[in-house]
Amino acid sequence: MQTIDNFKFAGKKAIVRVDFNVPLDENGKITDDTRIRGALPTLKKVLADGGSLIIMSHMGKPKGKVNAKYSLSQIVDAVSEKLGVAVKFADDCAKAADAAAALQPGEVLLLENLRFYGEEEGKPVGIDKEDPAYEDAKKAMKASQKEFAKTLASYADCYINDAFGTAHRKHASTAVIADYFDAENKMLGYLMEKEVQAVDNILSNINRPFTAIMGGSKVSTKIGIIENLMDKVDNLILCGGMTYTFAKAMGGEIGNSICEDDKLQLALDIIEQAKAKGVNLVLGTDCVAADDFSNDANTQVVPANAIPEGWEGLDAGPETQKAFAEAIEGAKTILWNGPAGVFEFDNFTAGSRAIAEAIAKATANGAFSLIGGGDSVACINKFGMADKVSYISTGGGALLEAIEGKVLPGVAAIKG
């Protein structure tokens, strides 16, 4: 497989898929430039070697229609500043051949939002899945997707995928485009290489004990990951809103706490699966309950299986925090996906902070720690502890699918 370090970019045009789907405020200003900063090593490598850059990305979900709210023109100045080069802009990604051809070594062109074209995602636009004509429309769109990818490929001599956040999608720019470059002219960017290696460290190069922390509101959204991890982990911490589905399944009273009533048997099955596989399953024993879903609600610490009517669990309690820390601090491999409570409210951050502090302590003692998923990343950043863990993944859905053991189309298109 070709690598970015071995490729000779001098005099070549490189089209690079990045993930510049950054959050913007009401004035179109970037509120978090993490994703742009993450792509800089790859982009600067091409320029430093004497190549020229064609950068492509999506933003938001415009569903195949032009929408100024999602225009990448809003980030041109920020990208220019970070790269130290005046970035040119093509206001139509499918009609940028002349602009691409005119690029000189050291110059940069940013293409308009790829998802202004339905062909990027390869899904029919404006037709319901239940419509009898949907399947024919889908086939036609797949053919159009190939043409769209071919057009993008025609702008450059080589292709780099550095967008791990979209690697789980078989989109025109993340997978299909790779068909139009031979093996010597397509490669993963630095960010993608690091992400793939981080996942490999978690799933293949495991130093034990291995502790995984799975949080979030619903067990149903994490079941694939939980089941895949059961054969790999020594300790599995389940926290956040899903805690109360487990508590109710075991006969507990959970008040007004979030719960998936149709997943109670699934929760019991997970408990039995952990026992059968010898996994130490750590569930909350107490919680911080509130009488309203707000930062200023009245609170009390109660057993996680005895929450009064009219109250709801919003964070892990002090005993649960201790149990979590114990399972984390002795680990040598750690994966964290999902907060322990409603960390967006400052008064309900203690559980998530306890997890972050325990991970930082374990990392300082030599553990490899991977933080992935938007909320976990937001937690670690909120607590100012990003530099105290081994790796923070930029890919939410892509990371979760990789951990589930699924093949990522964006990676397979390069690696074969």
Image (cartoon, grey):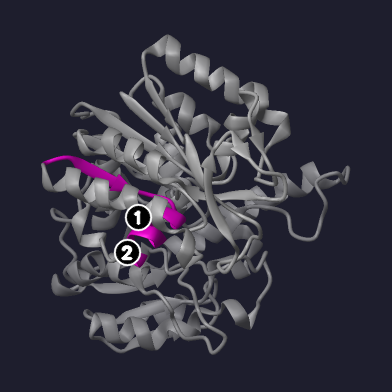
Residues marked 2 and 1 touching at CB (< 8 Å): yes
Which quadrant: the N terminus? top left
Q: Residue at x 47, y 36 (%)?
A: 284
Q: Amino acid at mark 2?
A: Phe
Structural distance between the alpha carbons of marks 2 and 1: 7 Å
Q: Residue at x 51, y 14 (%)?
A: 272
Q: Which residue is mark 1?
A: 353
Q: Of callouts 2 and 1, which one flags the residue occurring earlier in the amino acid sequence? A: 1
Q: How many numbered marks appear?
A: 2
Q: Mark 1 falls on what kind of element?
A: helix
Q: Residue at x 62, y 34 (%)?
A: 245
Determine which quarter of the picture holds residue 53.
Answer: bottom left
**Where is 395 relative to 280, above or below?**
below
Q: Which residue is mark 2?
A: 383
Residue 336 lies left or right of residue 58; in this view the side is left
x and y, in percent, of residue 166 in the image: 46, 53
Q: Residue furthest left?
A: 365
In this view, the residue in front, 88 or 287, is 287
Q: Amino acid at mark 1?
A: Arg
Q: Residue at x 44, y 25 (%)?
A: 228
The residue carrying pointer 1 sits among few (fewer than 14), some (14 to 19) or many (20 or more) residues within 10 Å by Cα, namely many
Residue 34 at least partly seen: yes
Which quadrant: the C terminus? top left
Magenta-tinted stretch: 366-382
Q: Residue furthest right?
A: 132
Q: Mark 2 falls on what kind of element?
A: loop
Residue 408 at least partly seen: no
Whether residue 24 appears in magenta in the rendering, the answer is no
**Where is 216 relative to 245, above or below?**
below
x and y, in percent, of residue 356 in the image: 30, 52
Whether residue 375 appears in magenta in the rendering, the answer is yes
